[in-house]
Amino acid sequence: MEASPAEDHADVHILPPLLFLGSILLGVLLQLALALRFATQSGWRLPLGLVLVVLGVAAIAWVIGWMRRTHQDPDPRKPTPELIVGGPFRFSRNPIYTGMALIQTGAGLALGNLWILIFLAPTLWILRRGVIEKEEAYLTRKFGDAYVAYTRSVRRWL
């Protein structure tokens, strides 16, 4: 039985970009109050961090472009009209979230802020419980065996 338009969504209440942004901002604020830095200074952190941020932004741009071409909305609160298994979704079931995690990791490295890196773990836990599990349940209900087969062939992250 098809869900009504009002029920055709993953019942997600957390906006992933705000979750990651909040995590980064919390790390910045804690750094101001209680600095937590890397044990040694290194010239590799800034360039590596910037590369990770650029890769994360590029990944997100690629995914959003792909979703727009297939008439999908990246907002997890909106309906998913069809299962996308091409483009960036060949490599990850959650390529936007992977990009966001790269940005947070890169920001922590580039800024020399361990708080940002420490907060990545709880951010990913909240993302998995509050967003990904709901999205996966929704997609399984909506697309059935096709989605289950997709989950068996493509990793959640990378």
Image (cartoon, grey):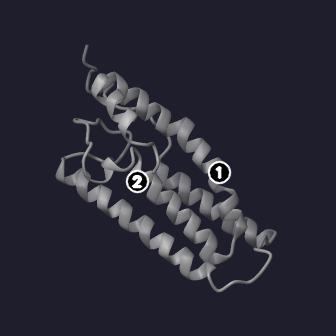
Q: Which residue: 26% across, 27% down?
A: 5
Q: Which residue: 59% across, 42% down?
A: 126
User: Which mark sits nearer the N-terminus, 2 or 1?
Assistant: 2
Q: Position of residue 129 (x, y in %)?
A: 56, 36
154 or 131: nearer the viewer: 154
Mark 2 crowd level (few <14, some 14–19, many ≥20, 10 Å Cα): many
Q: Amino acid at mark 2?
A: Ile
Separation of marks 2 and 1 at Cα, in angstroms: 17 Å
Mark 1 crowd level (few <14, some 14–19, many ≥20, 10 Å Cα): few
Q: Which residue: 64% across, 76% down?
A: 111
The quadrant of the rendering that contains the N terminus is top left
105 or 153: nearer the viewer: 153
Work out which residue is located at the far front of the displayed protein and give it. Answer: 153
Residue linked to disc 2: 96
Q: Is residue 119 left or right of residue 5?
A: right
Residue 39 makes an appearance in the image: yes
Residue 11 makes an appearance in the image: no
Q: Position of residue 97 (x, y in %)?
A: 46, 52
**Residue 77: which quarter of the image?**
top left
Q: Amino acid at mark 1?
A: Ala
Q: Which residue: 75% across, 73% down?
A: 32
Q: Which mark is residue 121?
A: 1
103 vs 129: above or below? below
Q: Is residue 13 left or right of residue 82?
A: right
116 vs 152: above or below? below
**Residue 104: which quarter of the image?**
bottom right
93 or 35: nearer the viewer: 93
Q: Please, what secondary structure does the residue beneath circle 2 have?
A: helix
Q: Please, what secondary structure does the residue beneath circle 1 have?
A: helix
Q: Which mark is residue 19?
A: none
Q: Position of residue 28 (x, y in %)?
A: 67, 68
